[in-house]
Image: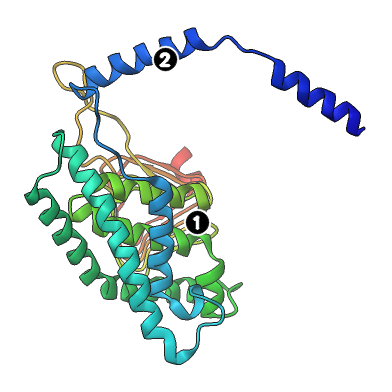
């Protein structure tokens, strides 16, 4: 067997693939694309998805050091660990913010004002971390109280994909609000890959938000969700249509997703589309397709939608 493997390795090493023409054609396509999109051939570096994944995990550990930090973390060392983690994580985030601002500027180099803006964004984000922790504490309690299968708060924090997705969303939303939407979207998509839950960082979500099970949930950019809202798996809060301008291009930035008021429950598989309002205290049944507003305290089922 060893002799066969050695012969195979030698055969592979001696095989020559004709790729020079492929490399040349790829260069030509790449050059044309860069000139069309950037106007020059030296595009600014984009933020790194891999680095942002590490940053997000570092921030989660700093927010919940006793549960998401090192297993051997001693009680007297928590503040030191949090400070050290935040210092390294926020410095890494600052670099990624500089990359995004450089990309947005379209210039060859990021000027002094750009560096100062990146620092200001990073500092403002850092100051929001205590409030993010308070919001997440409410979300975790809502999940614990809303799921009879949850045995303790810690189980919710370390096991529930909905809480992981909401944590990433709350971090990303702050960055989105602070003017770095590309980084925010990348962090949200990292969570999407991990959990199967897609929450656009532009969505506005209130306190005590709970996603049960979670796989397949989609929450669009201009969605507004109130307090104490619960969604189950495969729920879509999406757009009904996409208006175009006089040139046939999609109009961006308009409000096109639902408003879900306080104390609403949306069961598995429901699809809610367009800028409609789900009134406070309503329950939307499983697999309902809804494109009209409903008043407070409504009970919407599939049977009602078919009549």
Please name the residue shown 18% across and 45% down the image: 101
User: Is residue 35 placed above or below 160 in the rendered structure?
Assistant: above
Q: Which residue sits at x=34%, y=74%? A: 133
Q: Residues within 10 Å of mark 2 (few under 14, many from 20)?
A: few
Looking at the image, the residue that sits furthest to the bottom is 76
Sequence-wise first label, 1 or 2: 2
User: Decide: marks 1, 2 in contact (CB < 8 A)?
Assistant: no
Task: State how far apart marks 1 and 2 are (Cα).
Answer: 45 Å
Where on the picture, by quarter, is residue 271?
top left
* 296 left or right of 194 in image: left
Q: Going by the picture, which residue comes out furthest to the right?
A: 1
Find residue 40 and report its horizontal and vertical position in percent.
19, 22
Q: Nearer the viewer, residue 172 or 118?
A: 118
The N terminus lies in quadrant: top right
User: In the rendering, at what x and y percent does residue 90 appear?
Assistant: 29, 64
* x and y, in percent, of residue 102 in the image: 18, 41
Of circles 1 and 2, which is in front?
Answer: 2
Which residue bears the numbered disc 2?
Answer: 26
Place of residue 148 in the rendered image (x, y in percent of width and height, measured from the top left) = 58, 74
The residue closer to the viewer here, 303 or 171, is 171
Is residue 304 placed above or below 61 in the rendered structure?
above
Q: Which residue is labeled 1 in the image?
A: 232
């Amino acid at each position: 067997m060893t002799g066969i493997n050695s012969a195979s390795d030698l055969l592979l090493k001696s095989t020559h693939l004709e790729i020079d023409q492929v490399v040349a054609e790829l260069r030509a396509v790449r050059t044309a694309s860069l000139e069309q999109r950037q106007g020059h051939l030296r595009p600014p570096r984009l933020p790194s998805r891999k680095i942002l994944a590490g940053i997000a995990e570092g921030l989660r550990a700093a927010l919940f050091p006793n549960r998401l930090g090192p297993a051997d973390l001693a009680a007297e060392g928590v503040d030191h660990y949090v400070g050290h983690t935040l210092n390294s994580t926020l410095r890494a985030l600052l670099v990624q913010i500089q990359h995004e601002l450089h990309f947005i500027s379209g210039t060859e180099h990021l000027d002094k004002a750009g560096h100062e803006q990146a620092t200001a964004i990073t500092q403002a984000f850092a100051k929001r971390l205590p409030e993010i922790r308070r919001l997440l504490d409410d979300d975790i309690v809502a999940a614990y109280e809303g799921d009879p299968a949850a045995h303790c708060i810690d189980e919710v924090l370390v096991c529930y994909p909905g809480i992981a997705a909401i944590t990433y969303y709350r971090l990303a939303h702050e960055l989105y609000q602070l003017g770095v939407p590309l980084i925010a979207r990348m962090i949200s998509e990292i969570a999407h890959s991990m959990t199967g839950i897609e929450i656009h960082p532009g969505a506005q979500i209130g306190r005590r938000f709970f996603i049960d099970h979670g796989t397949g949930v989609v929450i669009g950019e201009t969605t507004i969700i109130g307090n104490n809202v619960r969604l189950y798996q495969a729920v879509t809060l999406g757009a009904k249509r996409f208006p175009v301008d006089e040139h046939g291009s999609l109009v961006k930035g308009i409000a096109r997703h639902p408003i879900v008021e306080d104390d609403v429950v949306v069961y598995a598989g429901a699809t809610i589309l367009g800028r409609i309002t789900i009134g406070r205290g309503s329950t939307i049944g499983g697999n309902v397709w809804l494109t009209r507003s409903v008043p407070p305290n409504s009970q919407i089922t599939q049977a009602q939608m078919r009549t």
